[in-house]
Amino acid sequence: MAASAEVRLAVFTKNRSNPAYEAARLGADRVAARLGATTVHYVPEAFDDPVEQSALVDEALATKPDGIVFTPTHPTKVNAALERIAAARVPLAGFVNPIPVGPCVTYVGADDAKLADAIARRLYGHLGGKGRVLLVSGPIESVTSIARTRAFSAAAKAFPGVALAGIVIGDYREDTARRRVGEWLAANGPVDGICAANDVMAIGALGALEDTRQSSTVVGVNAIPEAVAAIVAGKLLATADFAVLPSWSEGFPRSSLEAMSLGLPVVAVDACGIDEQVEHETTGLLVPPRDAPALADAIERLVEDDALRARMGRAAERRVAERFAMSTCATAMTRVWRDTIATARG
Protein backbone atom coordinates (compact mmCIF):
# COMPACT_ATOMS: atom_id res chain seq x y z
CA MET A 1 0.00 0.00 0.00
CA ALA A 2 1.49 3.36 -1.05
CA ALA A 3 2.27 5.88 1.67
CA SER A 4 0.01 8.92 1.79
CA ALA A 5 1.38 12.19 0.41
CA GLU A 6 2.90 14.60 2.91
CA VAL A 7 0.68 17.52 3.90
CA ARG A 8 2.13 20.90 2.88
CA LEU A 9 1.16 24.08 4.74
CA ALA A 10 1.77 27.68 3.68
CA VAL A 11 2.29 29.87 6.76
CA PHE A 12 1.84 33.64 6.47
CA THR A 13 3.15 36.04 9.13
CA LYS A 14 3.29 39.83 8.99
CA ASN A 15 6.97 40.67 9.43
CA ARG A 16 10.38 39.47 10.60
CA SER A 17 10.99 42.15 13.24
CA ASN A 18 8.40 41.13 15.84
CA PRO A 19 9.60 38.22 18.03
CA ALA A 20 5.98 37.10 18.48
CA TYR A 21 5.84 36.15 14.80
CA GLU A 22 9.22 34.46 15.00
CA ALA A 23 7.72 32.33 17.77
CA ALA A 24 4.65 31.68 15.60
CA ARG A 25 6.82 30.40 12.77
CA LEU A 26 8.77 28.18 15.13
CA GLY A 27 5.56 26.84 16.64
CA ALA A 28 4.12 26.07 13.21
CA ASP A 29 7.26 24.17 12.25
CA ARG A 30 7.26 22.11 15.44
CA VAL A 31 3.58 21.18 15.29
CA ALA A 32 3.76 20.36 11.59
CA ALA A 33 6.80 18.11 12.12
CA ARG A 34 5.04 16.33 14.98
CA LEU A 35 2.06 15.64 12.70
CA GLY A 36 4.11 14.62 9.69
CA ALA A 37 3.50 17.80 7.68
CA THR A 38 5.85 20.39 6.17
CA THR A 39 5.70 24.18 6.25
CA VAL A 40 6.73 26.93 3.86
CA HIS A 41 6.87 30.44 5.30
CA TYR A 42 5.76 33.57 3.47
CA VAL A 43 6.84 36.81 5.12
CA PRO A 44 6.86 40.29 3.53
CA GLU A 45 10.32 41.83 3.44
CA ALA A 46 8.77 45.25 4.00
CA PHE A 47 7.17 45.64 7.44
CA ASP A 48 3.46 44.65 7.43
CA ASP A 49 3.21 45.29 3.67
CA PRO A 50 -0.25 44.26 2.33
CA VAL A 51 0.79 44.56 -1.33
CA GLU A 52 3.73 42.22 -0.83
CA GLN A 53 1.65 39.82 1.26
CA SER A 54 -0.99 39.70 -1.49
CA ALA A 55 1.69 38.82 -4.03
CA LEU A 56 2.98 36.11 -1.71
CA VAL A 57 -0.51 34.61 -1.58
CA ASP A 58 -0.43 34.15 -5.37
CA GLU A 59 3.05 32.66 -5.09
CA ALA A 60 1.82 30.18 -2.48
CA LEU A 61 -1.35 29.26 -4.39
CA ALA A 62 0.77 28.41 -7.43
CA THR A 63 2.37 25.60 -5.39
CA LYS A 64 -1.08 24.14 -4.52
CA PRO A 65 -0.65 23.86 -0.72
CA ASP A 66 -2.93 21.58 1.29
CA GLY A 67 -3.72 24.38 3.75
CA ILE A 68 -2.87 27.96 4.63
CA VAL A 69 -2.24 29.46 8.06
CA PHE A 70 -2.65 33.22 7.83
CA THR A 71 -2.53 36.49 9.73
CA PRO A 72 -3.35 39.51 7.55
CA THR A 73 -1.02 42.50 7.48
CA HIS A 74 -3.97 44.90 7.19
CA PRO A 75 -7.68 44.79 8.17
CA THR A 76 -8.91 45.25 4.57
CA LYS A 77 -6.05 45.62 2.06
CA VAL A 78 -5.48 41.87 1.62
CA ASN A 79 -9.17 41.03 1.16
CA ALA A 80 -8.78 40.36 -2.57
CA ALA A 81 -5.97 37.90 -1.85
CA LEU A 82 -8.14 36.15 0.77
CA GLU A 83 -10.91 35.86 -1.79
CA ARG A 84 -8.46 34.17 -4.18
CA ILE A 85 -7.63 31.64 -1.44
CA ALA A 86 -11.35 30.96 -1.04
CA ALA A 87 -11.77 30.58 -4.79
CA ALA A 88 -8.93 28.04 -4.84
CA ARG A 89 -10.75 26.06 -2.12
CA VAL A 90 -7.66 25.85 0.06
CA PRO A 91 -8.54 25.41 3.76
CA LEU A 92 -7.63 28.56 5.69
CA ALA A 93 -6.82 28.95 9.40
CA GLY A 94 -6.38 32.39 10.89
CA PHE A 95 -4.47 33.63 13.93
CA VAL A 96 -3.77 36.90 15.79
CA ASN A 97 -5.70 39.21 13.42
CA PRO A 98 -9.22 38.19 12.35
CA ILE A 99 -9.82 36.96 8.79
CA PRO A 100 -12.15 39.65 7.34
CA VAL A 101 -13.50 37.82 4.28
CA GLY A 102 -13.99 34.28 3.01
CA PRO A 103 -14.43 30.98 4.84
CA CYS A 104 -12.09 30.18 7.72
CA VAL A 105 -11.73 26.66 9.11
CA THR A 106 -10.60 27.96 12.50
CA TYR A 107 -9.24 31.08 14.15
CA VAL A 108 -6.97 31.48 17.17
CA GLY A 109 -6.67 34.90 18.78
CA ALA A 110 -6.78 36.81 22.03
CA ASP A 111 -9.24 39.22 23.62
CA ASP A 112 -6.94 42.21 23.16
CA ALA A 113 -9.26 44.62 24.95
CA LYS A 114 -9.53 42.45 28.06
CA LEU A 115 -5.79 41.77 28.02
CA ALA A 116 -4.92 45.45 27.73
CA ASP A 117 -7.44 46.45 30.40
CA ALA A 118 -5.80 44.08 32.90
CA ILE A 119 -2.31 45.33 32.04
CA ALA A 120 -3.29 49.00 32.25
CA ARG A 121 -5.02 48.48 35.60
CA ARG A 122 -1.88 46.74 36.87
CA LEU A 123 0.19 49.80 35.96
CA TYR A 124 -2.29 52.39 37.24
CA GLY A 125 -2.70 50.48 40.50
CA HIS A 126 1.07 50.16 40.89
CA LEU A 127 1.32 53.94 40.55
CA GLY A 128 -1.10 54.34 43.46
CA GLY A 129 -3.88 55.48 41.14
CA LYS A 130 -2.19 58.74 40.20
CA GLY A 131 0.43 60.15 37.86
CA ARG A 132 1.13 61.00 34.23
CA VAL A 133 1.09 58.06 31.82
CA LEU A 134 2.28 57.88 28.23
CA LEU A 135 0.65 55.35 25.88
CA VAL A 136 2.65 53.69 23.10
CA SER A 137 0.56 52.22 20.30
CA GLY A 138 1.30 50.02 17.32
CA PRO A 139 0.52 50.94 13.70
CA ILE A 140 -2.53 53.20 13.33
CA GLU A 141 -4.54 50.59 11.40
CA SER A 142 -3.45 47.55 13.44
CA VAL A 143 -6.47 45.65 14.78
CA THR A 144 -4.64 44.52 17.92
CA SER A 145 -3.17 47.93 18.62
CA ILE A 146 -6.50 49.73 18.22
CA ALA A 147 -8.16 47.39 20.74
CA ARG A 148 -5.29 47.60 23.21
CA THR A 149 -4.87 51.38 23.07
CA ARG A 150 -8.60 51.95 23.52
CA ALA A 151 -8.58 49.65 26.55
CA PHE A 152 -5.57 51.48 28.02
CA SER A 153 -7.53 54.74 27.77
CA ALA A 154 -10.80 53.27 29.06
CA ALA A 155 -9.12 51.71 32.10
CA ALA A 156 -7.78 55.12 33.16
CA LYS A 157 -11.36 56.28 33.84
CA ALA A 158 -11.38 54.06 36.92
CA PHE A 159 -8.36 55.97 38.28
CA PRO A 160 -9.24 59.70 38.53
CA GLY A 161 -5.70 60.53 39.55
CA VAL A 162 -4.18 59.07 36.39
CA ALA A 163 -3.66 61.58 33.58
CA LEU A 164 -2.97 60.25 30.07
CA ALA A 165 -0.23 62.60 28.95
CA GLY A 166 -0.13 61.53 25.31
CA ILE A 167 0.09 58.76 22.74
CA VAL A 168 3.18 57.85 20.73
CA ILE A 169 2.91 55.61 17.67
CA GLY A 170 5.69 53.05 18.02
CA ASP A 171 4.61 50.85 15.07
CA TYR A 172 5.30 47.64 17.06
CA ARG A 173 9.03 48.24 16.46
CA GLU A 174 11.75 48.72 19.05
CA ASP A 175 13.79 51.27 17.10
CA THR A 176 10.75 53.37 16.17
CA ALA A 177 9.39 53.32 19.73
CA ARG A 178 12.77 54.23 21.18
CA ARG A 179 13.17 57.20 18.84
CA ARG A 180 9.61 58.54 19.12
CA VAL A 181 9.25 58.03 22.87
CA GLY A 182 12.61 59.73 23.33
CA GLU A 183 11.49 62.69 21.23
CA TRP A 184 8.22 62.93 23.17
CA LEU A 185 9.98 62.81 26.56
CA ALA A 186 12.48 65.46 25.46
CA ALA A 187 9.64 67.76 24.40
CA ASN A 188 7.12 67.08 27.16
CA GLY A 189 9.08 66.07 30.22
CA PRO A 190 9.01 62.95 32.41
CA VAL A 191 6.04 60.65 33.05
CA ASP A 192 5.29 58.30 35.90
CA GLY A 193 4.29 55.37 33.71
CA ILE A 194 4.51 54.11 30.13
CA CYS A 195 1.94 51.62 28.83
CA ALA A 196 3.09 49.95 25.58
CA ALA A 197 0.87 47.84 23.32
CA ASN A 198 3.59 45.19 22.94
CA ASP A 199 6.85 44.18 24.59
CA VAL A 200 9.01 45.16 21.63
CA MET A 201 7.92 48.79 22.09
CA ALA A 202 8.24 48.49 25.87
CA ILE A 203 11.90 47.57 25.39
CA GLY A 204 12.20 50.56 23.06
CA ALA A 205 10.65 52.79 25.73
CA LEU A 206 13.24 51.57 28.25
CA GLY A 207 15.93 52.58 25.77
CA ALA A 208 14.33 56.01 25.39
CA LEU A 209 14.33 56.49 29.16
CA GLU A 210 18.00 55.58 29.23
CA ASP A 211 18.72 57.97 26.35
CA THR A 212 16.95 60.88 28.08
CA ARG A 213 18.22 59.96 31.55
CA GLN A 214 14.71 59.69 32.90
CA SER A 215 12.93 56.99 34.89
CA SER A 216 9.42 55.61 34.65
CA THR A 217 7.46 52.40 35.29
CA VAL A 218 6.95 50.56 31.99
CA VAL A 219 4.60 47.71 31.07
CA GLY A 220 4.13 45.81 27.80
CA VAL A 221 2.34 42.85 26.20
CA ASN A 222 3.66 39.45 24.92
CA ALA A 223 6.27 38.16 27.42
CA ILE A 224 9.06 37.93 24.86
CA PRO A 225 12.41 36.72 26.30
CA GLU A 226 13.87 40.24 26.35
CA ALA A 227 10.90 41.47 28.37
CA VAL A 228 11.13 38.59 30.84
CA ALA A 229 14.82 39.43 31.33
CA ALA A 230 13.91 43.08 31.91
CA ILE A 231 11.27 42.05 34.47
CA VAL A 232 13.78 39.87 36.32
CA ALA A 233 16.24 42.79 36.27
CA GLY A 234 13.58 45.08 37.76
CA LYS A 235 13.40 47.32 34.68
CA LEU A 236 9.92 46.30 33.49
CA LEU A 237 6.78 45.86 35.58
CA ALA A 238 5.49 42.28 35.69
CA THR A 239 1.85 42.06 34.68
CA ALA A 240 1.24 38.29 34.89
CA ASP A 241 -0.90 36.77 37.64
CA PHE A 242 0.70 33.32 37.42
CA ALA A 243 2.91 31.22 35.15
CA VAL A 244 2.13 28.02 33.25
CA LEU A 245 4.73 25.41 32.28
CA PRO A 246 2.83 22.76 30.27
CA SER A 247 5.80 20.82 28.86
CA TRP A 248 6.08 17.19 30.00
CA SER A 249 9.82 16.81 29.35
CA GLU A 250 11.95 19.12 31.46
CA GLY A 251 15.24 18.92 33.31
CA PHE A 252 15.35 21.67 35.91
CA PRO A 253 13.63 24.64 34.20
CA ARG A 254 14.69 28.20 34.94
CA SER A 255 11.50 29.84 33.66
CA SER A 256 9.47 28.51 36.58
CA LEU A 257 12.06 29.71 39.09
CA GLU A 258 12.13 33.15 37.46
CA ALA A 259 8.33 33.37 37.74
CA MET A 260 8.40 32.26 41.38
CA SER A 261 11.11 34.79 42.19
CA LEU A 262 8.70 37.48 41.00
CA GLY A 263 6.02 36.26 43.37
CA LEU A 264 4.00 34.29 40.82
CA PRO A 265 2.48 30.86 41.50
CA VAL A 266 3.19 28.22 38.85
CA VAL A 267 0.93 25.69 37.15
CA ALA A 268 3.17 22.91 35.84
CA VAL A 269 3.20 19.32 34.65
CA ASP A 270 4.50 16.97 37.34
CA ALA A 271 7.49 15.68 35.40
CA CYS A 272 11.23 15.39 35.94
CA GLY A 273 12.59 17.93 38.41
CA ILE A 274 9.72 20.38 38.53
CA ASP A 275 8.39 18.98 41.81
CA GLU A 276 11.62 20.13 43.51
CA GLN A 277 10.59 23.69 42.64
CA VAL A 278 6.80 23.74 42.77
CA GLU A 279 5.22 22.46 45.96
CA HIS A 280 1.70 21.35 45.06
CA GLU A 281 -1.01 23.46 46.71
CA THR A 282 1.63 25.67 48.34
CA THR A 283 3.64 27.47 45.64
CA GLY A 284 1.55 26.34 42.70
CA LEU A 285 -0.39 23.47 41.19
CA LEU A 286 0.99 20.28 39.60
CA VAL A 287 -0.98 18.23 37.07
CA PRO A 288 -0.31 14.82 35.46
CA PRO A 289 1.56 14.74 32.11
CA ARG A 290 -0.56 14.87 28.95
CA ASP A 291 -3.73 15.64 30.91
CA ALA A 292 -5.19 18.71 29.17
CA PRO A 293 -8.43 18.79 31.22
CA ALA A 294 -6.47 18.76 34.49
CA LEU A 295 -4.22 21.56 33.19
CA ALA A 296 -7.25 23.61 32.18
CA ASP A 297 -8.88 23.05 35.58
CA ALA A 298 -5.73 24.19 37.40
CA ILE A 299 -5.48 27.32 35.26
CA GLU A 300 -9.16 28.12 35.78
CA ARG A 301 -8.78 27.65 39.53
CA LEU A 302 -6.03 30.27 39.74
CA VAL A 303 -7.84 32.63 37.37
CA GLU A 304 -10.90 32.64 39.59
CA ASP A 305 -9.26 32.78 43.06
CA ASP A 306 -7.39 36.02 43.78
CA ALA A 307 -6.64 35.05 47.38
CA LEU A 308 -5.18 31.68 46.36
CA ARG A 309 -2.92 33.33 43.76
CA ALA A 310 -1.69 35.85 46.31
CA ARG A 311 -0.99 33.19 48.97
CA MET A 312 0.82 30.88 46.56
CA GLY A 313 2.74 33.79 45.04
CA ARG A 314 4.13 34.83 48.42
CA ALA A 315 5.07 31.24 49.20
CA ALA A 316 6.73 30.83 45.79
CA GLU A 317 8.87 33.92 46.30
CA ARG A 318 9.96 32.70 49.75
CA ARG A 319 10.80 29.22 48.41
CA VAL A 320 13.07 30.60 45.71
CA ALA A 321 14.81 32.92 48.17
CA GLU A 322 15.33 30.13 50.71
CA ARG A 323 16.21 27.19 48.48
CA PHE A 324 17.36 28.47 45.09
CA ALA A 325 19.28 31.68 45.74
CA MET A 326 22.68 31.74 44.05
CA SER A 327 24.52 31.61 47.37
CA THR A 328 22.43 28.66 48.59
CA CYS A 329 23.02 26.70 45.38
CA ALA A 330 26.75 27.47 45.42
CA THR A 331 27.05 26.27 49.01
CA ALA A 332 25.17 23.05 48.22
CA MET A 333 27.29 22.39 45.12
CA THR A 334 30.49 23.00 47.08
CA ARG A 335 29.33 20.47 49.67
CA VAL A 336 28.67 17.88 46.94
CA TRP A 337 32.13 18.30 45.44
CA ARG A 338 33.81 18.13 48.83
CA ASP A 339 31.93 14.94 49.71
CA THR A 340 32.75 13.45 46.31
CA ILE A 341 36.47 14.22 46.68
CA ALA A 342 36.52 12.88 50.24
CA THR A 343 34.86 9.63 49.11
CA ALA A 344 37.27 9.23 46.21
CA ARG A 345 40.25 9.67 48.52
CA GLY A 346 38.89 7.01 50.86
Image (cartoon, rainbow, N blue to C red):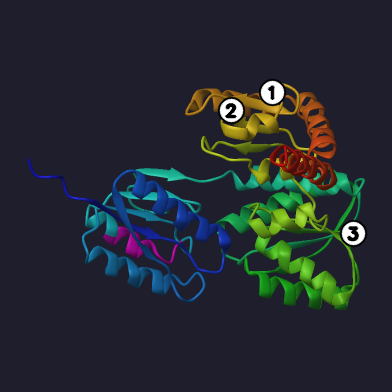
Quick one: label 2 or label 1, which is nearer the N terminus? 2
Q: Residues within 10 Å of mark 1 (few under 14, many from 20)?
A: some
> Which residue is drawn at the image coordinates 90% and 68% (left, top)?
190
Q: Are marks 2 and 1 in contact (CB under 8 Å)?
A: yes
Toward the left, the furthest residue is 1
**Badge 3 is on which residue?**
192
> Which residue is drawn at the image coordinates 50% and 67% (left, top)?
15
- Residue 325 % position (x, y): 82, 43
In the image, 8: left or right of 249? Answer: left
Does the magenta run of residues contain 80? yes
Camera-nearest residue between 167 and 215: 215
- Judged by its main secondary structure, the magenta piece is helix
Quarter of the image holding residue 324? top right
Quick one: label 1 or label 3, which is nearer the N terminus? 3
Q: Secondary structure at mark 3?
A: loop
Q: Residues within 10 Å of mark 2 (few under 14, many from 20)?
A: many
Q: Amino acid at mark 3?
A: Asp
Q: Which numbered marker is on residue 334?
A: none
Q: Secondary structure at mark 2?
A: loop
Q: Are marks 1 and 3 in contact (CB under 8 Å)?
A: no
**Badge 2 is on which residue?**
270
Camera-nearest residue between 290 and 62: 290
> Which residue is drawn at the image coordinates 34% and 64% (left, top)?
80
- Residue 266 % position (x, y): 68, 34
Quarter of the image holding residue 44? bottom left
Camera-nearest residue between 266 and 135: 266
Give the alpha-carbon distance from disc 2 to disc 3, as whole Å.
41 Å
Quick one: label 2 or label 3, which is nearer the N terminus? 3
**Badge 1 is on which residue?**
280
Magenta range is: 76-84
